[in-house]
Amino acid sequence: MGLDIRIPLGLVFFIIGGIMGIFGLCTQGDASLYERSLGLNINLIWGGLMFAFGAIMFFFGKRQKWQDDPVSPRPWEREPKTPPH
């Protein structure tokens, strides 16, 4: 089956993290937004973490996968090679 949840999940985290990171960069000097979070730019921090998590999920979802292909089976499913007699 070709359904892999890591690709759309990775894209969602990638996009939302990017938006949060950009918002955090644009509002970096605004003290009124970050006075409740002890001066930490939470949008930038969590946006970066979500962006990285989404990129990792998308990467692992798009990497080369083993296919159930009888022509080129997985290495552990191959018939053992017997030496010539």
Image (cartoon, rainbow, N blue to C red):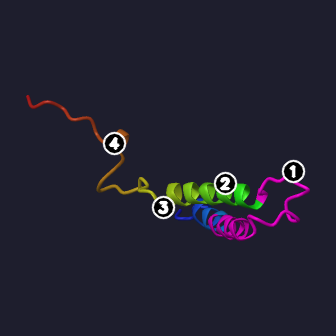
Question: Residue at horizontal 87%, vertical 50%?
Answer: 38
Image coordinates for residue 14, horizontal then vertical, percent:
62, 65
Q: Quadrant of the C terminus?
A: top left
Dot 3: element? helix
On the image, numbered disc 4 is attached to which residue? 75
Q: What residue type is labelled 3?
A: Lys
Image coordinates for residue 42, horizontal then vertical, percent:
78, 56
- The tag on residue 49 is 2
- The tag on residue 62 is 3
In the rendered view, does 10 fall on the left or right side of 60? right
Dot 1: element? loop
Mark toward the start of the polypeptide (2 vs 4): 2
Q: How far apart are marks 3 and 4 (CA)?
A: 21 Å
Which stretch is magenta? 14-42
Crowding around mark 2 (Cα neighbors within 10 Å: few <14, some 14 to 19, many 20+) is some
- The tag on residue 38 is 1
Mark toward the start of the polypeptide (4 vs 1): 1
Outermost residue to the left: 85
Closer mark to the observer between disc 2 and disc 4: 2
